[in-house]
């Protein structure tokens, strides 16, 4: 039997009774990071006076999941196997989907427990109506990032994006360059002590969030496009006219072209 178990995204009190029971009954714990899961069990055992007993911990993450699944056989799941990612729901911007596919293809019984998920928590907090499309983490740079962001902005549903702290302000600049009127909702460190919400247009939000407060994981909810399936974009010439500092402008131009930040910064200083 395989069970996918969601874990708290910050607050330990978000663990469910079913999740606690599944963790207690597990013979094998497949973990995105065994160190994170061992620490979680230690904290849960202290808080809820639970005895999780002796488990076999096996690392299963995005870099080894294909090789792991290739070398096991369905007999592996005659034991009680539980998979947990580091936080939240497995399979949602975390490993887990390939495990489910393996179970489906090999007739392995499996279950997925409901629980904490950053995407639904942030969306409920956004106040936007209607359905949403989840884009997870965008590509880090280049045309792939530009195309993914334009797809999210052109969606006829609200869009949810995950973003790392060191790229948040860059994302706001990119959205401001493409559609400065679009309304966004930002959620930082959901369920944790420093949880914060921000709502407004990209340039407003970039001014509201000082550099020292960018730390922590972010969920960005983008209000749906008001035009039908129309890709909103700017030419390089239009971007060059944006009233941004040269350093920021060079970074933005590098994301939508084949030139590096250094090349664009040199160009901007010479022209």
Image: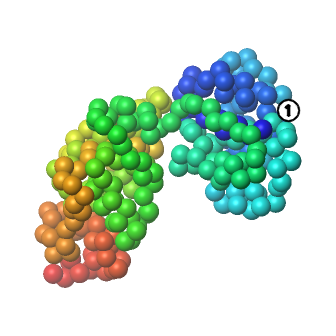
Report crowding for label 1: few under 14, some 14 to 19, many 20 or more residues within 10 A (C-alpha).
Answer: few
Give the quadrant of the N terminus: top right
Residue that numbered label 1 is attached to: 54
Side (left or right) of 112 relative to 217 = right
Front position in the image: 68 or 168: 68
Q: Is residue 80 above or below residue 180?
A: above
Quadrant location of residue 127?
top left
Where is residue 85? Give x, y as percent.
63, 43
Q: How many marks?
A: 1
Q: Residue at x 57, y 31 (%)?
A: 114
Q: Residue at x 71, y 53 (%)?
A: 105
Side (left or right) of 115 relative to 256 = right
Side (left or right) of 200 relative to 99 = left
Where is residue 65? Give x, y as percent.
70, 57
Q: Residue at x 64, y 57 (%)?
A: 62
The answer to whether residue 63 of the structure is visible from this angle is: yes
Q: Residue at x 22, y 41 (%)?
A: 200
Q: Residue furthest top?
A: 49
Front position in the image: 61 or 249: 61
Where is residue 166? Give x, y as percent.
41, 54
The answer to whether residue 34 of the structure is visible from this angle is: no
Quadrant location of residue 190?
top left
Where is residue 63? Give x, y as percent.
66, 60
Front position in the image: 137 or 132: 132
Asked which colour scheme the image uses, the reply is rainbow
Give the quadrant of the C terminus: bottom left
Secondary structure of residue under mark 1: loop
């Amino acid at each position: 039997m395989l069970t996918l178990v969601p874990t708290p995204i910050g607050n330990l009190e978000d663990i469910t009774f079913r999740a606690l029971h599944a963790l207690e009954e597990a013979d094998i714990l497949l973990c995105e990071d065994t160190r994170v899961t061992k620490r979680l069990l230690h904290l849960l055992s202290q808080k809820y006076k639970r005895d999780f007993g002796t488990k076999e911990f096996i690392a299963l993450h995005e870099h080894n999941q294909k090789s792991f699944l290739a070398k096991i056989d369905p007999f592996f799941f005659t034991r009680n196997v539980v998979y947990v990612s580091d936080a939240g729901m497995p399979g949602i911007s975390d490993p887990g989907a390939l495990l489910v596919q393996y179970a489906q293809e090999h007739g392995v019984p499996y279950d997925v427990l409901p629980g904490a998920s950053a995407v639904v928590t942030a969306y409920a907090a956004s106040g936007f109506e209607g359905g949403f499309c989840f884009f997870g983490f965008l590509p880090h740079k280049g045309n792939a990032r530009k195309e993914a962001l334009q797809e999210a902005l052109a969606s006829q549903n609200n869009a949810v994006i995950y973003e790392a702290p060191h790229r948040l302000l860059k994302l706001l600049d990119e959205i401001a360059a493409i559609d400065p009127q679009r309304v966004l909702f930002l959620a930082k460190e959901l369920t944790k002590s420093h949880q914060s919400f921000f709502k407004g247009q990209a340039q407003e939000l970039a001014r509201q969030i000082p550099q020292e407060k960018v730390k922590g994981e972010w969920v960005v909810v983008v209000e749906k496009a008001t035009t039908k399936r129309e890709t909103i974009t700017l030419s390089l010439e239009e971007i060059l006219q944006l009233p941004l500092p040269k350093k920021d402008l060079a970074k933005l131009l590098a994301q939508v072209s084949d030139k590096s930040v250094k090349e664009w910064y040199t160009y901007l200083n010479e022209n």
